[in-house]
Image: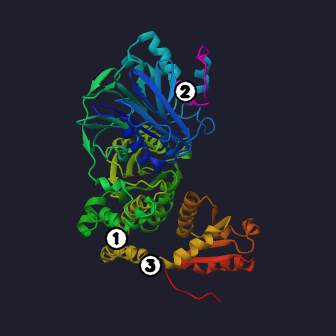
């Protein structure tokens, strides 16, 4: 989730790179750095901690028209100035996102270099420098580089005494922004929106040469013609407006984006049938995702299985790609990813394609790798999601899976067509919940003082508990665990102590009494019980 920004153009670069890095802060980082060319010399500025620490070291008035910047999240080596990007080795200065799996082997082969950091990225800089010494042609070097590196990478590269900015990517996202005043590289669109909304998506194993006027793309040393894209959202999508943070803003955007997502499918029964025709042929479905996308699969898969009478299994992408699978005659694999670039999910998709299995991508980013490579794609309309802890993308993804369940339920005569009209009210129902959060604020204050929080649920409620627990961990750093309520007695209950919050989700009447019995158990041990339900009931 590190951030890359680079610029080459007719105007000063330092402010553009720093502003771009600040717009990518949502990706998380522990250090930041910038490299820029001044009087044909590369100047490096790096700092551990927030970008403000870096800004204290920078003179914005320095004249430079070529530079790269980076926000690092430590993978190889602790957070410190030495491990921060950019890295300079010989004539090569670079920033890197991704992980080079064979960097230790490469480092041994580069024994004539002295390494100042613990990173895999500095090894890549040394490798490029060595290749460049032999060839002195960066197009050839970038083409050869791919034969040496195992893993994922997005690289922004500056070469001594060279006015160009170079970029290459494999399994780590990178875009190229274009404007009248110069050209950009960036990890994500928000980094360039202040200056341009026009950009190219770099494909796997492509590399690019940027100067102040042009961008040239290559694949296997052959020039590529690419489609210029335009970000169709508003520039203020990357602005917090009056909200304290982006996650809060995106929570309140949910009613709109959910309705934007479902409206094109839900006009009437004919529209629903047209959009989802063919799902009934499948005799087995696997849903694959990482993190929240995996939890979407657990919740949505429960609905599809219930109303579609189809076996549905949800898998963590990083596990799915390495296991053997036994597909039914008509099998579908649904890949879920907000960015459309999630490496493990993309690898699972490619495995499915190799196996000849039907694939469907549910993604938020038009033209992303997963969207391009899947057999079919459904785009959610969540818009730009900046918060690392996904909210609106999660609910939009779930909306799509629930629509598939709705279609199959009507097809199987389990649900009535009138459910379509009920479904159209979902945006308003969510808006009503968001309109009064006084109770939630009270609970948040209680949770903020806790060291441990437990979530309990059964069936679909348990799937929701997993996502709720992940959210709490992501945003508060409070230890949290979700458990299937029926497993409580198998060891977990021994962890329940006086005043530990236990949040139980109860929305399924068929198991309500079962879960309530577990609530009584934790209360007997002194837990602070919180119940989230869609109905009011009395506990005796």
Under circle 2, the secondary element is: helix
Mark 2–mark 1 CB contact (< 8 Å): no
Asked if residue 478 shows in the view, the reply is yes
Separation of marks 3 and 1 at Cα, in angstroms: 34 Å
Mark 3–mark 1 CB contact (< 8 Å): no
Residue beneath label 2, please? 122
Residue situated furthest top in the rendering: 134
Q: Please give the range of residues in magenta.
A: 109-124
Q: Tell me if mark 2 has few (under 14), some (14-19) or many (20+) residues whose alpha carbon lies within 10 angstroms of its own.
A: many
Give the tally of numbered discs.
3
Q: Is the residue 76 above or below the residue 540 in the image?
A: above
What residue is at 33 percent from the left and 54 percent from the top?
A: 379
Q: Quadrant of the C terminus?
A: bottom right
Q: Quadrant of residue 512?
A: bottom right
Residue 8 point in image, percent of width and height? 33, 30
Under circle 3, the secondary element is: loop
Q: Which mark is residue 410?
A: 1
Residue beneath label 3, please? 436
Magenta residue check for 528: no
Under circle 1, the secondary element is: helix
**Horizontal arrangement in the rendering, residue 478 relative to residue 227 (left or right):** right
Q: Tell me if mark 1 has few (under 14), some (14-19) or many (20+) residues whose alpha carbon lies within 10 angstroms of its own.
A: many
* Front one among 198 and 240: 240
Q: Tell me if mark 3 has few (under 14), some (14-19) or many (20+) residues whose alpha carbon lies within 10 angstroms of its own.
A: few
The earlier-in-sequence mark between 3 and 1 is: 1
């Amino acid at each position: 989730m590190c951030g890359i920004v680079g610029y080459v153009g007719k105007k000063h670069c330092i402010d553009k790179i720093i502003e771009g890095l600040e717009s990518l802060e949502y990706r998380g980082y522990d250090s930041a750095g910038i490299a820029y060319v001044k009087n044909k010399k590369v100047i490096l500025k790096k700092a551990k901690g927030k970008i403000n620490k870096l800004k204290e070291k920078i003179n914005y008035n320095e004249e430079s028209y070529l530079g790269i910047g980076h926000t690092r999240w430590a993978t190889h080596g602790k957070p410190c100035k030495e491990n921060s990007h950019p890295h300079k080795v010989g004539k090569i200065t670079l920033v890197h996102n991704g992980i080079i799996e064979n960097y230790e082997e490469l480092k041994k082969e580069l024994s004539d270099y002295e390494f100042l950091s613990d990173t895999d990225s500095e090894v890549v800089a040394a490798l490029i420098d060595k290749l460049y010494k032999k060839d002195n042609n960066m197009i050839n070097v970038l083409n050869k580089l791919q034969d040496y590196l195992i893993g994922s990478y997005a690289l922004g590269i500056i070469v001594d005494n060279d006015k160009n900015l170079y970029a290459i990517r494999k399994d780590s996202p990178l875009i190229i922004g274009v404007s009248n005043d110069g050209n950009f590289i960036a990890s994500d669109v928000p980094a360039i929106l202040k200056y341009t909304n026009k950009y190219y998506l770099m494909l796997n194993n492509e590399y690019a040469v940027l100067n102040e006027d042009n961008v040239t793309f290559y694949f296997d040393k052959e020039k590529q013609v690419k489609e210029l894209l335009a970000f169709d959202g508003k520039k203020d999508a990357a602005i917090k407006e009056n909200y304290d943070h982006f996650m809060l803003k995106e929570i309140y955007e949910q009613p709109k984006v959910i309705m934007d997502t479902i409206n094109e499918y839900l006009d009437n029964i004919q529209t629903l049938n047209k959009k989802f025709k063919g799902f009934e042929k499948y005799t087995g479905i696997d849903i694959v995702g990482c993190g929240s996308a995996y939890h979407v699969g657990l919740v949505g898969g429960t609905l599809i299985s219930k109303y579609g009478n189809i076996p549905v299994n949800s898998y963590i992408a990083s596990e799915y790609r390495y296991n053997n699978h036994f597909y039914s005659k008509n099998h579908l694999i649904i890949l879920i990813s907000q960015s459309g670039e999630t490496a493990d999910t993309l690898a699972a998709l490619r495995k499915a394609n190799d196996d000849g299995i039907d694939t469907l991508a549910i993604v938020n980013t038009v033209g992303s790798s997963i969207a391009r490579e899947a057999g079919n794609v459904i785009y959610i309309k969540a818009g730009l999601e900046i918060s690392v802890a996904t909210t609106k993308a999660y609910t939009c993804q779930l909306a799509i899976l629930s629509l598939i369940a709705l279609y199959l339920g009507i097809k199987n005569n389990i649900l009535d067509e009138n459910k379509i009209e009920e479904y159209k009210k979902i945006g308003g129902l969510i808006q009503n919940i968001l309109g009064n959060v006084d109770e939630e604020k009270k609970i948040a204050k209680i949770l903020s003082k806790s060291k441990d929080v437990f979530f309990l649920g059964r069936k679909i409620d348990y799937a929701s508990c997993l996502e709720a627990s992940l959210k709490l961990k992501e945003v508060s750093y409070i230890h949290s665990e979700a458990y299937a309520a029926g497993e409580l007695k198998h060891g977990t209950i021994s962890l329940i102590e006086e005043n530990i919050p236990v949040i139980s989700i109860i929305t399924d009447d068929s198991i309500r009494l079962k879960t309530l019995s577990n609530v009584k158990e934790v209360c007997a041990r002194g837990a602070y019980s919180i119940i989230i339900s869609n109905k009011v009931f009395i506990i005796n």
